[in-house]
Amino acid sequence: MRDLGTGFGYLAKGQRWAAGHGRWLGFGLIPGLITLLLYAAALTGLALGADDLIAWATPFADDWSSPWIGLFRGFLTVLLFVLGLFLAVITFTAVTLLVGQPFYESLSEQVDKSESPDGTAPESGLPLLRELWISARDSLRILVRAVLWAVLLFFLGFIPVIGQTVVPAIGFCVTGFFLAQELTSVALQRRRVEVREQLALLRANRMMTWGFGVPLALSFLIPFVAVFLMPGAVAGATLMVRDLRGENELPPQQPGPQGGQVQGQVQAPGPYGQPHQPGQPPQAQHPQQPQPLQNNPYAK
């Protein structure tokens, strides 16, 4: 349960970061506003045409007596709109990230620079068009997974009692997980982490992922809220990625000559890798091959 709170804490930290950097907050609102207009038009069309679509899809019910035909088709109409809303919540983030790739890339990079001890941020080193292609490809893969879950939950919704209680809860957990994956992918792609490794990282920290993504999924059901939360959500996802990959850990310190701590100071090596003792002349050493750095998060 503590991991749930930790995940929610990252979401809150991201919103505070965005609120404290007003220029980046306004910069990150642009893609969300564009996507919101597109989704509002699509959902409005679905709401207006859902009745006709359900009537066309259920010709076998034309001869049913009232009120059963109305109840049956009314239930399917509501279920269809809920399914469309479910897909809209899941895909809103993916489409917004695709539309606003340059915007959120810059925002995530700025978060990295503000949190990094040396003020730097990881870079993929890939051209913009290549990054857009990778983002679109990975988003499509996640969308296919999300649609499969949506279809499964749609049919499970017909089960009495369970379909009205357990299934919606599972749906929000699934939505929250995929939202977290889409948002963390902005920072992970700059670190050259493939989508399979991204999913494995989030599955290994499933409770934290739900703590971050499920409250965000619930808030996205409120009109216009998603637009204003997106910049902070990208910032919070970047903070979560940094901690999951251990990038906020300080390098170890070496003891100084008076017993103090001197960061970055290295003793001259003695023979066979033993430290050189002060006051004694250095002895001949066997040459050693340099060893590569281990656990370097930017080596990937």
Image (cartoon, rainbow, N blue to C red):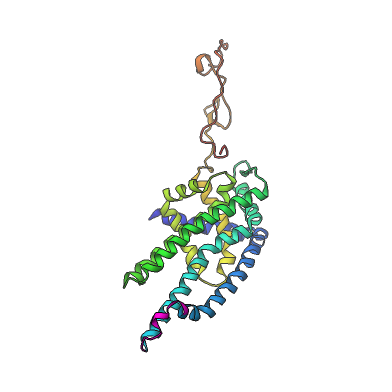
Identified at 57% across, 11% down, the residue is 281
Q: Is residue 230 above or below residue 270?
A: below
Q: Can I make out residue 242 in this image?
A: yes
Name the quadrant of the C terminus: top right
Q: Is residue 15 above or below residue 274?
A: below
Identified at 58% across, 31% down, the residue is 264
Give the percent coordinates (x, y) of residue 104. 62, 55
Give the percent coordinates (x, y) of residue 209. 45, 55
Identified at 59% across, 52% down, the residue is 135
Give the percent coordinates (x, y) of residue 223. 55, 72
Residue 138 appears left or right of 7: right
- Of 157 and 20, the residue lying toward us: 157
Q: Can I make out residue 8 in this image?
A: no
Residue 122 appears left or right of 10: right
- Residue extending farthest to the bottom is 66
- Of 298 and 73, the residue lying toward us: 73
- Of 57 and 227, the residue lying toward us: 57
Where is residue 235, by image quadrant? bottom right
Q: Does the stretch in magenta take in 61?
A: yes
Q: Does the stretch in magenta take in 18?
A: no
Q: How many marks?
A: 0
Q: Which residues are magenta?
A: 56-65
Name the quadrant of the N terminus: bottom left
Q: Is residue 63 above or below residue 100?
A: below
- Of 41 and 227, the residue lying toward us: 41
Q: Is residue 192 above or below residue 227?
A: above
Give the percent coordinates (x, y) of residue 83. 46, 70
